[in-house]
Image (spheres, rainbow, N blue to C red):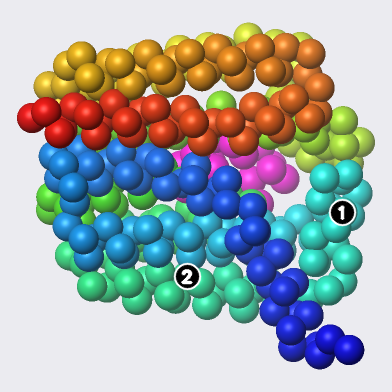
Amino acid sequence: MDLPGPRKFHACLRLTRIDRPIGIFLVGWPMLWALWVAADGLPDLWVLTVFVVGCVAMRSAGCAINDYADRHIDGHVQRTRARPLATGELTPADALAVFAGLCLLSFLLVLTLNGLTIKLALLGAVLAALYPFTKRWTHWPQLFLGLAFAWAVPMAFAAESGGVPIGAWYVFAAAVVWALIYDSMYAMVDRDDDLKIGVKSTVVLWGRFDRLLIGVFQLLMLAILVAAGQAFGYGLPYLCGLAAASAVGVYHQWLIRRRDRDACFRAFLHNNWLGACVFAGIAWQVHLA
């Protein structure tokens, strides 16, 4: 017979989605873009370690606070009805404890970095805690998710170079827009359920213009990334990475063309490859410098 402890531990792992690492990748790619750009190559190994561990911890913390915020909603949504808070395997207090513990771990790691990074980390924690509640009062929770996910970019620049230059804010803006894109694809999966229970999202607001507006934001992201490359003096290798990322974006438009739930979810998951293409372009560029 399984003991309550192991069962609860397993439920906590599911709460943090550690078995579904796509969120870690989507947070991690902009962070890696920023670290490689700021270092002009391989970043300091301790800084890299802190950010990788912090990325896993804060994404997991975000899942915990998200499920706490959605504890009365998840049971009514097809995709989320088996989550531990929805099924009663964990209590709201359990979720808050997991969130607090992971935030504390991340903060202890950040304390080993410079003062500017610590200050930015405090604001990042506020953004991570605020995001899950935004879907109650705005149709733009995906934008708030982008702010929370992309905040690793200025933190990475601060930790690696001691400052946040103007080009870093271009990278930050591109990461925010990217999160708006892929989380809108994710929201397309839940749109029917969200309409029934009154949850707000970009695709609920956009209606039949959802694909068009996702395409507009894809072009905006590309334009911002080109501007970021110009700010750092990047050339052909970087642009090749952006070209590959653009091709991936076109494929995502093909996947969501019929608004099929499974296809939209595949498009969301496949954004991992878009982030990898941008990183490959950056890594190739700085390797040749």
Does the magenta portion include 140? yes
Looking at the image, which is closer to me, 259 or 243? Answer: 243
Drawn side of residue 179 relative to residue 161, left or right: right
Q: Spatial distance from mark 1 to mark 2, Cα to Cα?
A: 26 Å
* Number of residue marks: 2
Residue identifier under label 2: 103
Secondary element under disc 1, as helix, strand or loop, is: loop
Describe residue 10's horizontal placement relative to residue 32 as left or right. right
Please tell me whether residue 124 is drawn above or below residue 187 in the rendered image. Answer: below
Residue sitting at x 43%, y 20%? 245
Kind of residue indicated by mark 1? Arg
Boundaries of the magenta span: 133-148
Foreground disc of the pair 1, 2? 1
Specify whether residue 72 is in view.
Answer: no
Q: Position of residue 251 (x, y in %)?
A: 59, 15
Q: Disc 1 marks which residue? A: 81
Q: Residue 16, position in %: x, y?
A: 63, 63
The residue lying at 41 percent from left, 33 percent from top is: 276
**Marks 1 and 2 close (CB-CB < 8 Å):** no
Dominant secondary structure of the residues highlighted in magenta in the image: helix
Three-letter code, disc 2: Cys
The residue that appears at 8% across and 30% down in the rendered structure is 289
Q: Position of residue 187 (x, y in %)?
A: 71, 33
Say above or below: 202 vs 74: above
Q: Which mark is residue 192?
A: none
Lateral position of residue 7 relative to residue 148, left or right = right
Q: Is residue 121 magenta?
A: no
Q: Is residue 30 visible?
A: yes
